[in-house]
Image (cartoon, grey):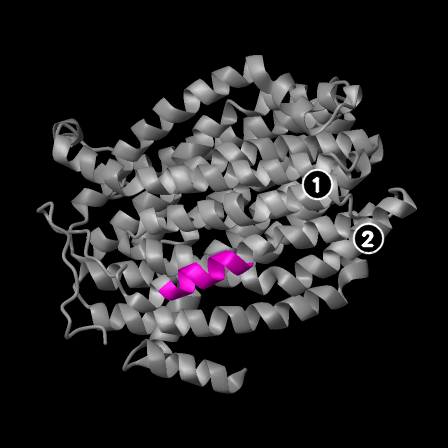
Amino acid sequence: MGSQLQTVSQLMTANPESQLRQSLRLAWPISLQNLLVTLLSMIDVVMVGHLGDAAVASVGLGNRIQFVVLVIATGLSWGVGVLAAQYYGAGRTIKIRQTMQMASVFAICSLTPIAVASFFLADNVVSWASNDPELISLAETYLWITMPSLVFVGIILIIENALRSIGQVKLPMVFSVIAIAINIVLNYWLINGGFGVPALGVEGAAWATLISRVIHLAILVLFLISAKHMLAPKSGDLAELRKKKDWWKLFHLVWPMMISFGIWSVGTFVYQLIYGQLGTQSLAVMSLLSPVEGMFLSLFFGLASACSIQVGQALGADDFDKAWRVAKAFLLICPAVALVTGGLVLSLQSLILMPYQNMAPETLFMAKQVFVLIALGAWLKVTNMTLALGVLRAGGDNKFCMVTDITGMWVVSIPLTFVAATVWQLPLIWVALAAYSEEIAKIVLFGWRTFTKKWMQNLAGDDETIIEPSKKTAQ
């Protein structure tokens, strides 16, 4: 590992130690924040664990359905981050606030209809995954309460990505920690009751989620305004928002990303539907392990974000050589660290699964099998995350990423997983293994595209023509 770090340092820049420190400075707050957010999903499942398999599966399924919508918003916010990083590299900071405000309008217009539709369609969507009446009833109630909160989350994600792109990665982390703490306290109170409030169970977990997300957005916006931050709304912003060219530029960048993220997130829900065909027990296993896998991947989300920020800033400054050096460095270190971390996580299996010891022995046995797969296979997902989010999308290569996501998931993996579950009727562990065919297909396509260097584009120019590196640069 030491020799790999030395190689990384040599690749990144002529001042390797400074560049490596900058990468870690950007990465650790983002990783910690995403780790805590994912841990919160895990805590939601744990805190209703004493209510039985149906409660666990309903919260897990409800979170997965929310995840489908939330990832679409993430695609929009990531597009903001890409443009903001390049604008920052080009020294055009006023455009960052404008991009953030336009994206917030997009978020409200796209997420509000989905929140309204959930009141009419929640039971139908849940019934696709299970025919258990208790599970359907609990998940429906959970979704009715929590889906409107995604409008607030969409705006939060946009503000956070804009802050990260200008190097202010600790602010989003601090406010996220506050919101998570509020959510945990409300979870305990409303699930179990107290101070005149009856025990609400799954419904209490839902109300805790909604309230904490509203508070999160409120304190974030109030801070920007009170601190007179460069991203806070200012007089004259409305005039800037009337420029149709800027709206089109943002839309042109984000629509493939939103569709790509959306189709991918729908696919993750389809996986849940497939697991649901194996029974409530299998669905409960995947529901309790999804946050565990998410926590693992969150450790590397910060590195992918740091890669995107630094590559984007270099591209915005027309420094294509530096962008390529940084990209190669991250592509070397992330998979290697993921392999080592996976082995460490596997050695801690009994400790990580300890909160679920009150579940049925057969459920725990299945969970341990899938846990091994997650620990040993996570490096594939980390590599694809770095290739797609950290490198290709930093240059705005979103259409290729969209096609690759669709191909890997919908053409290769989902059909194979469906056949494994329904035709071959394999045990859960083999069905879960079939789902990893998506990662194998994507790593081939993403890897090939990265080394063609066609993704290297400057998106921060005023004109509509994208600046591309000359044949001489980035060799």
Q: The residue under label 2 is which amino acid type?
A: Met
Q: Is residue 342 magenta?
A: no
Residue at figure coordinates x 17%, y 62% from the top left: 317
Check disc 2 and report the residue beneath it: 354
- Closer to the eye: label 1 or 2: 1
Instruction: Give x and y (percent) for residue 198.
Output: 77, 18
Residue 212 visible from this viewpoint:
yes
Which quadrant: the N terminus? bottom right
Q: Quick one: which residue is furthest to the top in this view?
A: 120
Residue visible at 37% across and 34% down in the picture? 221
Task: Examine the rendered structure and indicate whether residue 200 appears above or below residue 85.
Answer: above
Going by the numbered disc 1, the residue's amino acid type is Ser
Say which residue label 1 marks.
287
Quarter occupied by the C terminus: bottom left
Q: Of label 1 and label 2, which has the lower sequence position?
A: 1
Residue 363 x/y as whole percent = 85, 45
- Residue 203: which quarter of the image? top right
